[in-house]
Amino acid sequence: MDFVLAAIRRTRKCEHRRPLVYKLRADYKARRECAMLLGLSLFYVGAVLILNGLWMLGRIGEREIAVINLFTGGLTLLVSLKLALGEGADAESIKAAALSLLFSLTYLWFAFNRLSAADGRGLGWFSLFVAITAVPVAIDTLSTASTLWGWWSGLSWAAWALLWLLFFVMLVLNKPVVRFTAAMAIAQGVFTGWLPGYLLLTGAIG
């Protein structure tokens, strides 16, 4: 979910012959657009994590929970495709898209399992893949963090690594961690998704 940094780097590739004021305006517009896309994605990632946590606690039905997962998975898929294939795409934006797709696929796979009554072991193994991938991303992000946003991003990746590891433990190892995983999903939904997403959308940050 660090694709805002990729877009910021892309906006620096301005034509040197343009007046400085136009460069600044283009840079601000691109950064604002990226912040809004990130806010949009995080806002609904927060919603899906909170609702999935409630589902694990038995508060939401099997078929009904599929709706928010399909929506969020589809939304983040579209944002990722824009980053990877859209105008101005570069190595950084493609990397960001690849990482974001880890979560898009998780939500779409979860929705499929709810609608098809699959046992979830495949999703569990994929969750382990996500968790392992998220660890070096968290370490790399934290090692270069110099702003509050950078620290938030690194800590969020560490939190997502833990949560997706819990999905593996729950779905593949069948350990009794459902309530703990549910609480973790709800908390992360608030602090790594909904709250920063809302602040980005309202312009309070970004």
Image (cartoon, rainbow, N blue to C red):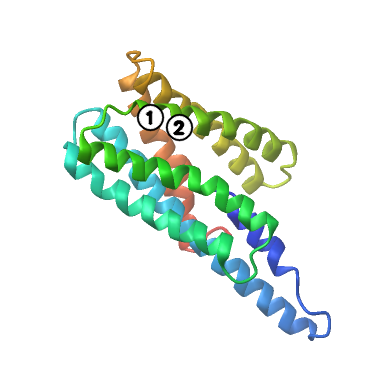
Q: Is residue 65 left or right of residue 122?
A: left
Amino acid on which the number 1 mark rests in the picture: Gly
Alpha carbons under labels 1 and 2: distance apart: 6 Å
Secondary structure under the numbered disc 1 in the rendered image: helix
Q: Which mark is residue 40?
A: none
Contact between marks 1 and 2 (CB within 8 A): the answer is yes
Along the line of sight, the residue nearer the viewer: 70 or 152: 70
**Above/below status of 26 relative to 68:** below
User: Would you call the spot at circle 1 few (<14 residues within 10 Å), some (14-19), or many (20 or more)?
Assistant: some
Residue 64 % position (x, y): 18, 44
Look at mark 1 in the image and give the residue it sits on: 122
**Above/below status of 167 relative to 77:** above
| Quadrant of the image occupied by residue 84 | bottom right
Amino acid on which the number 2 mark rests in the picture: Phe
Quadrant of the rendering where the C terminus is positioned: bottom right
Residue 32 % position (x, y): 57, 68
**Above/below status of 87 relative to 94:** below
Along the line of sight, the residue nearer the viewer: 80 or 61: 80
Report whether residue 152 is seen.
yes
Residue 96 % position (x, y): 60, 51
| Residue at x 41%, y 53% (from the top left corner) | 43
| Residue at x 32%, y 13% (from the top left corner) | 176
| Residue at x 28%, y 42% (from the top left corner) | 112
Report whether residue 163 is seen.
no
